[in-house]
Amino acid sequence: METGVHTLKDLFAQLGLPNGDAEIAAFIKAHSPLPEFVKLADAPCWTQSQAAFLREELAEDADWAEVIDQLSAALRAG
């Protein structure tokens, strides 16, 4: 079981995405704004495995849930 606080950089690395500050900002800009009615995991920018990871971690309220919520908020603020 993982414990600890994860960052957006950690989340992007976990998802297999480039995780530098500029790459994260570019991803958020490219995929924003995400409509409120679309669940983060249902956004079209994810592969099936990425979407499954996001769903599972949120459903389990796992260590990743907080940073996933941060990403969701950033994409909606776009």
Image (spheres, rainbow, N blue to C red):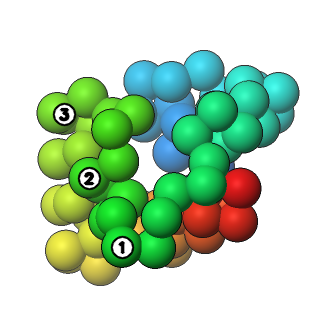
- The tag earlier along the polypeptide, 3 or 2, is 2
Label 2 crowd (10 A; few <14 / some 14-19 / many >=20): some
Instruction: Using the image, tell me which numbered label, if any, was put on residue 42.
Output: 2
- For image coordinates 51% across by 57% down, the residue present is 34
Category of crowding for the residue at label 1, using alpha-carbon neighbours closer than 10 angstroms: few (below 14), some (14–19), many (at least 20):
few
Total numbered labels placed on residues in the image: 3
- Image mark for residue 37: 1
2 horizontally vs 17: left or right:
left
Q: Is residue 27 visible?
A: yes
Q: Is residue 77 left or right of residue 17?
A: right
Disc 2 residue type (three-letter): Asp
Which residue bears the numbered disc 3?
A: 49
Q: Using the image as rendered, state which of residue 36 and residue 47 is in the foreground.
A: 36
Q: Is residue 64 rendered to the left or right of residue 53?
A: right
User: Residue drawn 48% across and 64% down?
Assistant: 35
Residue at the outermost right position: 22
Residue 44: % across, % down: 33, 38
Spatial separation of the CA atoms under disc 3 and disc 1? 21 Å
Residue 60 on image: x %, y %: 20, 75
> Tag 1 or tag 3, which sits nearer the N-term?
1
Does residue 5 appear anywhere in the picture?
A: no
